[in-house]
Amino acid sequence: MEYKDYYKTLGVACTATDDELKRAYRKLARKYHPDVSKEPKAEEKFKEVQEAYEVLKDKEKRNAYDHLGANWKEGQEFRPPPGFDGFSGFHQGAGGMGGMDFSDFFASMFGGGQTGGDPFGRRQARGGGHTAAARGRDEQARIAITLEEAFHGGSHTVSLQGNDQRTLKINIPAGIQSGQKLRLTGQGAPGMGGRNGDLYIEIDIRPHQTFTLQDKNIYLKLPITPWEAALGAKIKVPTLAGSVEMKIAPNSQSGQKLRLKGRGMPAKTGAGDQYIELQIMVPPAKSDADRELYEKMAQQMAFNPR
């Protein structure tokens, strides 16, 4: 029978760590999973990947494989030594691999492919001895987006790190809030005979230098001049949807709040509002003329705020 190079199957070096093996396996299992893959001979390659990982993830099996297979290379004929009947010291589970259909090479090495239960965590069906298909587990991720992205929504590229490095394009609904989760069906861990798990992406909205978000309302501190506050004015106010004109009433005060209805975050129950807090900014007296003007105001205006 042909010798199988499990390291080459997973695309890793013979010195690969457990994390590197796991990362390579998950990437290939997702690529060749028969339920979703469009690759040629996906099911056959999926089984090869499963078989390779079944051996290399187990310390005893990996040591045995490395020791016995040290003198063989992929494609060469593998002939077990005289009297070799597999590594019978490995525990033989009553259910075996439940029809995992591993290769003759695996069977010759490990006694027919039976191990101490299904390494992929699949449930044993009652009565018939067959292994039920197992759905892949759900996974979690978290991404940070800008307040503008949360307001407008749209396509967003996500780079996932860790054991399963990949890039996904997701759709951000307009008006999403921090803490909300998006569900990506089938983008979780690969299933073993069942469908893939789902990926849940939690949204974190970054702080904004101008606006503050509270629920679906937006707050803005707006600086104005003393004469705008005293005389009243029409000024442009920034919003996430663009600038709008707002009327400042005469004799307005610092800390006074004005509301722009419907200018907050969009929502199915109705958009939030934008609240404007006025902040009167006093210009500095940089010249003699400036000081003269302030002195004239002090003399002519009978005003004491205390």
Image: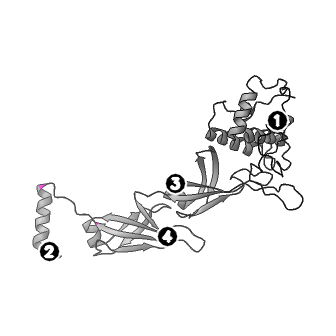
The residue that disc 2 covers is 301
Tell me the element at label 2. Answer: loop
Q: Is residue 12 above or below residue 243?
A: above
| Relative image position of residue 234 (x, y in whole percent) | 37, 68
Mark 2 against mark 3, which lies toward the viewer? 3
Precedes in sequence: disc 4 or disc 2: 4
Q: Point out the stretch of residues depicted in magenta.
A: 280-287
Q: Quadrant of residue 14?
A: top right
Whether residue 183 sits left or right of residue 216 in the image: it is right
Precedes in sequence: disc 2 or disc 3: 3
The residue that disc 1 covers is 86
Precedes in sequence: disc 4 or disc 1: 1
Tell me the element at label 1. Answer: loop
Q: Which mark is residue 144?
A: 3
Nearest the viewer among 171 and 191 is: 191
Q: Residues within 10 Å of mark 4 (few under 14, many from 20)?
A: few
